[in-house]
Image (tube, rainbow, N blue to C red):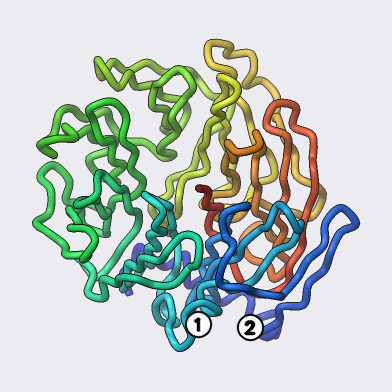
Amino acid sequence: MKIKHYLLVLVAVLPLLNACRKDETEQLSLPTIAASNAITTTGFANGFFIANEGWYGHGSGDLHFYDYSADTLRLNIYAAANPGKTLGGATSTLQFATIFRNKMYIVVKVGGPLVVTDANTMVESARLTTMPDNDGHAFLGLDSTKGLLTTGGGVYPITLPGLTAGTKLPGITSYSGDMIKAGNYVFVHAQTEGIVAYNASSLTVARTFGTANLCFALGKDGAVYAANTDSLIRINPTTLARTAVKLPFSTPSPWGAWRHSAITSSTTDSTIFIVRNNGFMGGTTLYRYVIGNTASLSTPFITLPSGQYFYGAGAAYDKSNNTLVVTTVNGPFTGSVNTVLRYNATTGTLINSNVFNGWYFPAMPVFY
């Protein structure tokens, strides 16, 4: 295991001190929402997914599904749809998932694999077992025949649908994470090289923008947003011009134990949301930047209920109903009480919550 993953070991070991079982999945339902362990292998179109890391050293991660129509949370839906298959081994971490052209691409960190499923049935259709650099972080689909995969050593083209890895792209040789396509460019976040813009057609380097901690969000104004230690960065995806707005807090480095970034944006309002983490995870406040209004950053937009702490990406925007989906655990670094909270993204009002027990470690919400 690479030294860069030492913080994951800390997260994995702390639950042992509580002497709790990995298979504990009892549902605790708040009055606003019902919870259910009933799992089907179809009907995943009306809701969103929660990708879970899994309990490091004890088993692989899986995904849960929040069903809008039933107000229920279905647990471990990948395992239910694919008997006998797993998303990596006990020392791997399911850290990223995304839906592209009705397929879900699930990326497992520290050894892989990269798995493709049907987004409506979760039935697996393809798998890349041998990962470049023996590591995988994020996937970005480009077209019907090609995508990109970031790893612990750079960015690789992936042939679709067969999942063949090509030659590493030029320009990045370090630990790499989130990606976004905007305009004619693909933006990649790397530890050493910082934000790198590639020409989307040729996949050659167009420009670099310096190091950053949180990447990326696509604003309603069409710009790409990221954050370095003390500023919110705006990149024009047409001209590649860069500007910055000072933040009233500092953002932590993600590279000790990489996860999908805690920055997201609204498609309804001209707003960017940033989770204020304390260190590489944790934290209890979320800030909203109204584009063009620096005063909007002066106070938190959302403060979590007492005893809850952001985990993984922490928050993501659901454009289907203008909500922020927030994932928490009951400790600043670890916890077996997981909560999914839904907030109105315009007002910050809490809509409902769902609590589920177990050492799941929610990595990120995933939307259609």
Give the number of the disc on residue 22: 2
Q: Residue at x 82, y 50 (%)?
A: 306
Disc 1 designates what residue? 59
Q: Quadrant of residue 333?
A: bottom right
Query: Relative to 98, does residue 351 appear above or below in the rendering?
Result: above
* Cα–Cα span, label 2 and label 1: 9 Å
Image quadrant containing the N terminus:
bottom left
Observer-nearest of 312 and 34: 34
N-terminal-most mark, 2 or 1 = 2
Query: Relative to 100, does residue 29 appear above or below in the rendering?
Result: below
Residue lying farthest to the bottom in this orientation:
84
Residue flagged by tag 2: what amino acid is it?
Answer: Lys
Give the number of the disc on residue 26: none
Residue flagged by tag 1: what amino acid is it?
Answer: Gly
Q: The residue tagged with tag 2: helix, strand or loop?
A: loop
**Left or right: where 72 falls relative to 262:** right
Residue 248's x, y, as percent?
Answer: 58, 25
Badge 2: residue crowd in 10 Å (few <14, some 14–19, many ≥20): some
Residue 125's x, y, as percent?
Answer: 34, 71
Mark 1 and mark 2 in contact (Cβ < 8 Å)?
Answer: yes
Residue 300's x, y, as percent?
Answer: 70, 30
Q: Quadrant of residue 160?
A: bottom left
Residue 9's x, y, as percent?
Answer: 48, 72
Q: The residue tagged with tag 1: helix, strand or loop?
A: loop
Q: Residue at x 41, y 59 (%)?
A: 104
Badge 1: residue crowd in 10 Å (few <14, some 14–19, many ≥20): some
Observer-nearest of 123 and 270: 123
Query: Relative to 353, does residue 250 appear above or below in the rendering?
Result: above
Q: Residue at x 10, y 45 (%)?
A: 170
Q: Residue at x 37, y 49 (%)?
A: 101
**Left or right: where 116 falls relative to 32:** left
